[in-house]
């Protein structure tokens, strides 16, 4: 063996040894994540969980544990379909931003320019919870497209607002998208039906129904073949049962909801309703990690993805809202008063040791499905469970442990 051959041979052995060490580290991290998630199921903290970790290039981890139906014990598979509820919102936001890129929607346009029914929105001036009496006034300014993408429109949900929960419209009063505005647009952040309005904007401007628009412009290019509002009958056996904790306060063991929702969604909305898999949503977050493109298909420009990840609420902060209904716990996963909101995403403010970077994007669905995207460290995670209440303490504990485990992959590569 001559000197050059020996040198190349030595380099090859060193590289192989390095690759072997990396594989061993990945295997060790995977085993630890498996143990953590399996342990949560065996302890009956959650009935089942599917989780996925990805970087910009590939899936680093995927695991499925527990059952898809607590009443039958049907095993949960990695390709299980979950109703992802408000994880639909980032998809709708991407669709709006595609139309913004094309110059067909302006972020600071009054939304009523595209949806005339919004012209009559009014702000709640006062509400007497005892008598039900209320007074309305005109808003200080019309809500813009940006307000609806950032939950600063003044709208709410019944489970995020006791006023919306309790207010009964008088005869003749019609409140588009659920109720009167709680405040003037732009003044506060309040989780709401705002993304339903964004979905209507997509339909009005594109001339397509949401299901069709999403399929053509997002799901097909990204090869998200298992994501849809309406689940085909052939895929029905893969759909995870809808479940909830028993009791009026939803603090008991997890039981089956009765009745179960149908496979079809009569009227798809931008704020929720999609069914998807961890693998499909993993492709969506990997697209975001890669600046709007995946496997040669581009759905957004890099500068648009960057814009979506910037603070669009200024000095307004995102509060850890108190729940007004048992179907959700308080929003304790938010860094109260410090986190911000972009165009479709919560923006993390704090660096917590072992977890995502400041500037990471995230959100979840009411059935305890969650995701985050960390552009700074090039990693994203998707974790899916399927039961109420939202932000259940045990579900959040599993989410926390999963995220900490996911960052071990980043550490192992250093």
Image (tube, rainbow, N blue to C red):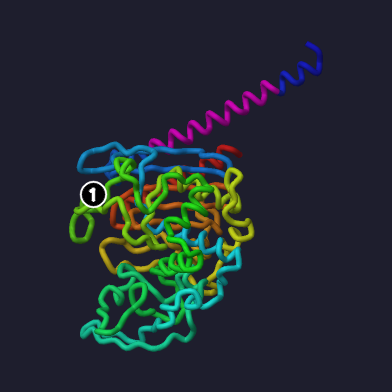
Residue 31 belongs to magenta span = yes
Residue 178 place in picture, x, y as percent: 33, 73
Residue at 29% of width from left, 86% of height from top? 134
- By secondary structure, the bulk of the magenta-drawn segment is best described as helix
Residue 318 visible in rendering? no
Q: Is residue 373 left or right of residue 50?
A: right
The crowding category of the residue bearing disc 1, from other C-alpha atoms within 10 Å (few below 14, some 14 to 19, many at least 20), is many
Nearest the viewer among 157 and 8 is 157
Q: Quadrant of residue 69?
A: top left
Residue 414: tell me if it is visible.
Answer: yes
Q: Which range is magenta?
A: 12-35
| 3 up-or-down from 160: above or below | above
Residue 223 location (% of width, % of height): 50, 44
- Please check the rendered image and state whether residue 303 is part of the magenta-colored stretch, yes or no: no
Q: Count the numbered circles shown.
A: 1
Q: Which residue is mark 1?
A: 254
Q: Nearer the viewer, residue 254 or 121?
A: 121
Q: Which quadrant would the C terminus be assigned to in this image?
A: top right
Q: Residue at x 39, y 74 (%)?
A: 155
Residue 273: name its quadrant.
bottom left
- Residue 74 falls in image quadrant: top left
Residue plotted at (34% across, 69% down): 157
Q: Secondary structure at mark 1?
A: strand
In the rendered image, the residue lying farthest to the top is 1
């Amino acid at each position: 063996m001559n000197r050059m051959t020996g040198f190349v041979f030595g380099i090859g052995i060193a590289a192989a040894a390095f690759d072997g060490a990396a594989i061993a580290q990945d295997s060790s991290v995977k085993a630890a994540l498996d143990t953590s998630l399996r342990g949560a199921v065996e302890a009956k903290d959650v009935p089942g969980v599917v989780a996925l970790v990805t970087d910009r290039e590939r899936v680093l981890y995927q695991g499925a544990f527990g059952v898809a139906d607590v009443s039958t014990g049907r095993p949960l598979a990695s390709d299980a379909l979950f109703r992802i509820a408000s994880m639909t919102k980032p998809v709708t936001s991407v669709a709006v931003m595609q139309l913004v890129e094309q110059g067909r929607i302006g972020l600071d346009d009054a939304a009523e320019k595209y949806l005339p029914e919004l012209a009559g929105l009014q702000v709640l001036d006062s509400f007497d919870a005892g008598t039900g009496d209320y007074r309305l006034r005109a808003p200080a300014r019309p809500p813009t497209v940006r307000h609806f993408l950032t939950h600063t429109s003044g709208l709410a949900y019944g489970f995020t607002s006791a006023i919306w929960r309790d207010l009964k419209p008088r005869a003749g009063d019609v409140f588009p998208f659920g109720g009167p505005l709680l405040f003037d647009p732009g003044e506060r952040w309040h989780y709401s039906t705002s993304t339903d309005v964004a979905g209507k904007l997509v339909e009005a401007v594109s001339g397509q129904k949401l299901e069709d628009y999403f399929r053509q412009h997002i799901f097909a290019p990204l090869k998200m073949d298992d994501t849809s509002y309406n689940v085909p009958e052939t895929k029905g056996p893969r759909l995870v049962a809808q479940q909830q904790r028993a009791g009026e306060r939803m603090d008991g063991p997890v039981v089956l909801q009765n009745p179960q929702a149908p496979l079809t969604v009569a009227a798809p909305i931008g704020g929720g309703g999609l069914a998807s898999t961890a693998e499909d949503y993993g492709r969506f977050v990997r697209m975001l990690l890669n600046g709007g493109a995946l496997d040669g298909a581009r759905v957004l420009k890099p500068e648009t993805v960057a814009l979506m990840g910037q603070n669009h609420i200024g000095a307004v902060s995102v509060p850890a809202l108190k729940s007004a209904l048992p179907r959700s716990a308080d929003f304790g996963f938010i860094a109260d008063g410090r986190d911000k909101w972009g165009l479709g995403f919560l923006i993390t403010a704090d660096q917590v040791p072992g977890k995502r970077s400041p500037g990471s994007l995230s959100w979840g669905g009411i059935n305890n499905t969650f995701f985050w995207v960390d552009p700074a460290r090039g990693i994203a995670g998707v974790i899916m469970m399927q039961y109420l209440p939202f932000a259940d303490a045990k579900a959040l504990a599993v989410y926390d442990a999963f995220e900490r485990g996911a960052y071990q992959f980043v550490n192992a590569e250093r």
